[in-house]
Amino acid sequence: MQIRIVHDAPVEVRAGAIVVPVFSDGRLSGAAVALDAALSGALADVVAGGELQGKLCEHALLHAKDKPFRRVLAVGLGDRAQLEPFMLARYAGAAVRVLGRLGISDVAIALPEELSGRAREAAAAVAEGATTGSFEITIYQRDPERRVAIESVAILSGNGDRKALEAGARYGSVAGDAVNFARRLAVTPSNDMTPTHLAEEAVKAASESGMTAEVRDEDWARAKGMGSFLSVAAGSAQPPKFIVLRYNGAPSSKDLLALVGKGITFDTGGISIKPAERMEDMKYDMSGGAAVIAAMSAIGKLKPKLNVVGIVPATENMPGGRATKPGDIVRAMNGKSIEIINTDAEGRLILADALCYANECGATRIVDCATLTGACVIALGHAAAALISNDDAFAELVLACAKPTGERYWRMPLFDDYGRQMRSDIADLKNTGGRDGGTLTAAAFLHAFVGETPWVHLDVAGTAYLDRGSAWSAKGPTGVPVRAFLALAERLAQ
């Protein structure tokens, strides 16, 4: 999708449609006023008649005879006083999905004048939302019934700062492409997204964005003492891959941000096999790894002055003849022994060695993300992801960076009680602590492998993929937490 900034007056823009915002107070402003005048008050009539009440992503389509713009799509933005830039991503995404399914290929999107002083953020949100709004999960359908056809999006500059708008549009386009990249990786079924294929995607992304990529095999992992990671891979015919992407944007700095993502390309549960119902969704169990690869690809293109390493331990979890069994004891890279109570608690096992490796790389901050626990969905539903940390300042920084992106995280505690719950009678640790506090005991297990490094754990089990779409986004994978990763990298680079 081509995204550009256009400085023409709204009534002079040539496009298949122009998109304008409408707020719940019913008062037209900015581009909507000029376009309403050109339409002889038709837009105001729709609002006054109650056909469009300005609710978020509610919309009304008007045709414009004999105008350079063929249509006007009014899209609701809710309460004017509550407007935040990230809402424009939803506004733009909804517009692209409505208009694209009508076969319209080029649209212009007006920015609300209320955000003219935040031009970069506004343009970034529109560019990101338009890009992610075009994504569909119908990639295996020969002739999909509904496909978004938008090829070109013009963002109307209004009275915003032009340089800021250009910078924002570029950032938003890169971010949107990265979110869609993560979504494509996640939605691809496991026969086409094996650990080997995931590694190939990572190598290709590194090549295209100026990073270095290392793909390590089973022998390397064994030499490193990654018994925890390899215990999960033992039952699969697919060879595991340990993927490392490096971006060196500040060569003179000793600071290193590590992004670590769970890369279980399919999770049967292993010997502790899952129920058959909805097991097909376990192709999404590599969503954390997909987010890390996609975020790293965007970081390579945006080039912040920051050093970042992306680490993705990738494997299937299968109940083969060599599979790890409940009661087996394995040893992680840092020497800690782990009693396997349940082979379906496998994500923490592969992350344990990945976190150890992040420290070996010299990470000064670590963020891991994983579809780790069903307990997180019970606690927070699909409205937010859990955030657990060993460092208050770093946790607050991640939360502050994520909030403007529209991704929602809720901090949960890391009390010593949860760590005690993970002690084994026979080994240093066990890999499950029972049903109580499942999200928090899983985080306590991971905490045993980060040492003193400031660390944030994101459990995105309830937000990485959704059963229902929205006005602005297709159902399925969401690309969480790519946006938060990019915002964090940008903040640390400053």
Image: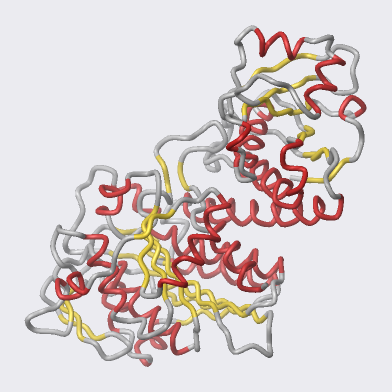
Number of labels in the image equals 0
Q: How is the image coloured?
A: secondary structure
Q: Position of residue 288 (x, y in %)?
A: 44, 62
Residue 363 vs 152, above or below: the answer is below
Whether 456 is drawn above or below 335: the answer is above
Q: Residue furthest left?
A: 425
Could you say which quadrant of the image residue 331 lies in? bottom left
Q: Is residue 14 left or right of residue 316?
A: right
What x and y, as percent, mark residue 409?
A: 43, 55
Q: Nearer the viewer, residue 41 or 227?
A: 41
Q: Quadrant of the C terminus?
A: bottom right
Residue 176 in the image: state x and y as whole percent. 64, 51
Left/right placement of residue 233 relative to residue 91 reads: left
Quadrant of the drawing holding the N terminus: top right
Q: Residue at x 57, y 52 (%)?
A: 405
Q: Residue at x 76, y 34 (%)?
A: 109
Place residue 62 in its image quadrant: top right
Placement of 112 over or under 17, stated as above or below? below
Residue found at x 79% / y 57%: 167
Q: Position of residue 164 (x, y in %)?
A: 81, 54
Q: Residue at (13%, 84%) from the top-left corner? A: 427
Q: Nearer the viewer, residue 192 or 246?
A: 246
Q: Is residue 159 left or right of residue 199?
A: right
Q: Which residue occupies the foreground of this view, 168 or 206?
A: 168
Q: Is residue 2 left or right of residue 313?
A: right
